[in-house]
Image (cartoon, coloured by chain):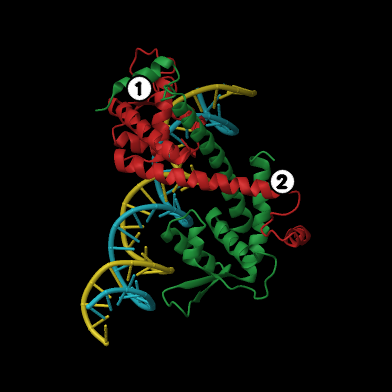
Chain colours: A red, B green, C yellow, D cyan
Amino acid sequence: MKTQDQEKSAQRRGTATGTAPGSSDGALVERWRSLLSCYSGIALALDRELHAEHGITMSDFEVLDRLAENSHPSGMEGCTEAGMRIQEIGEHIHLSQSALSRTVARLEKSGLVERVLCEFDRRGVFVALTKNGRACHTAAARTRLEVLREHLAG
Amino acid sequence: MKTQDQEKSAQRRGTATGTAPGSSDGALVERWRSLLSCYSGIALALDRELHAEHGITMSDFEVLDRLAENSHPSGMEGCTEAGMRIQEIGEHIHLSQSALSRTVARLEKSGLVERVLCEFDRRGVFVALTKNGRACHTAAARTRLEVLREHLAG
DNA sequence: GGACATTAGATGCGGACGCATGTAGTGTCC
DNA sequence: GGACACTACATGCGTCCGCATCTAATGTCC
């Protein structure tokens, strides 16, 4: 189906697992491994800390973070929260639409965000931080920083 | 509950979400976001491709990869497979012990690895690539490379 | 050699994910 | 204005994960 030759030549170079030819391939895999390792370590620690200290997951925090960013983008905001469309959040987060929907549901159940039906487009939903949600985000952001300081060369 | 001040000052700097004080903190968060984004994109694509083309997950592939590395570390190997202890694999992979155990079980069920009871320590298990397992790893390694080339600046 | 801590691996459990699909509400074209 | 494609979000489903715990086999100390 494919060229066995490519792999054979890789083996001939003696570096196993495709670490062979132009060296850029090997370097690519090496970069990926390093990325994976770095991410995994931090994600594990961060998820654990966020869960232990604030009862939320990394994804939960990401959503809170987007909402917090959005609500005081320039330090000037009168209304407590205008809210963001779920879709809009989705554009700034690495989560499937379904996972995002459930994450918002979870956050709502925890009282950290509010869902407000959109008047203009009744399919849509606005999501806004509650008071508790903002407090949780503030505290969790501090936790994030601590974890990053420890695990991301600081 | 905590110092609103810190967050306020962040707002004053106008960059939201803790991008404020010593700049190293903000940079740290920025690096983390970048790492997260980079990882998420690649992981999603890689997992999809591996699943579609070889019916395995990223974790499955990682295990196959460790086994393949181990079995012909210098291009010189007579015996088909000596096998690796699960524990040993665990030292080189970012997966909990339970997840690793299940991953090996999955791979065995798919006929990609064999489990051999260890004679010396009857608690232990040796895991070795089968012929199919090696073929799958070879093919999947090519897939990985393609995905990395596309998603990791290559 | 028998009691006790320790280790290797398996497994029950609940949570989060992505994919596919369902369900409203919206735009569009005739 | 009614049919039809499309959008925004929710949900059923199967899978993978980590944590806690269990089991069986070593070691260890007396």
Quadrant in the picture for residue B8? top left
In the picture provided, is C7 more to the left or to the right than A20?
left
Task: Tell me what residue is drawn at x 57 percent, y 50 percent.
Answer: B47
Say whether residue B2 is visible: yes
Quadrant, the C terminus of chain B: top right
Say whether residue A122 is visible: no
Residue with the mark numbered 2: A24
Residue with the mark numbered 1: B7
Q: Position of residue B92 (x, y in %)?
A: 52, 57
Q: Position of residue B67 (x, y in %)?
A: 58, 64
Q: Position of residue B137 (x, y in %)?
A: 63, 61
> Relative to the observer, which residue lies in front, A110 or C28?
A110
Task: Tell me what residue is drawn at x 34 percent, y 28 percent.
Answer: A138
Residue A137 in the image: above or below residue B78: above
In the picture provided, is B55 more to the left or to the right than B23?
right
Q: Position of residue A130 (x, y in %)?
A: 30, 26
Q: Secondary structure at mark 2?
A: helix
In the picture provided, is B44 more to the left or to the right than A3?
left
> Relative to the observer, which residue lies in front, A7 or C26?
A7
Query: Is the residue at mark 2 from the same chain as the one at mark 1?
Result: no
User: Which chain letter goes with mark 2?
Assistant: A
Q: Secondary structure at mark 1?
A: helix
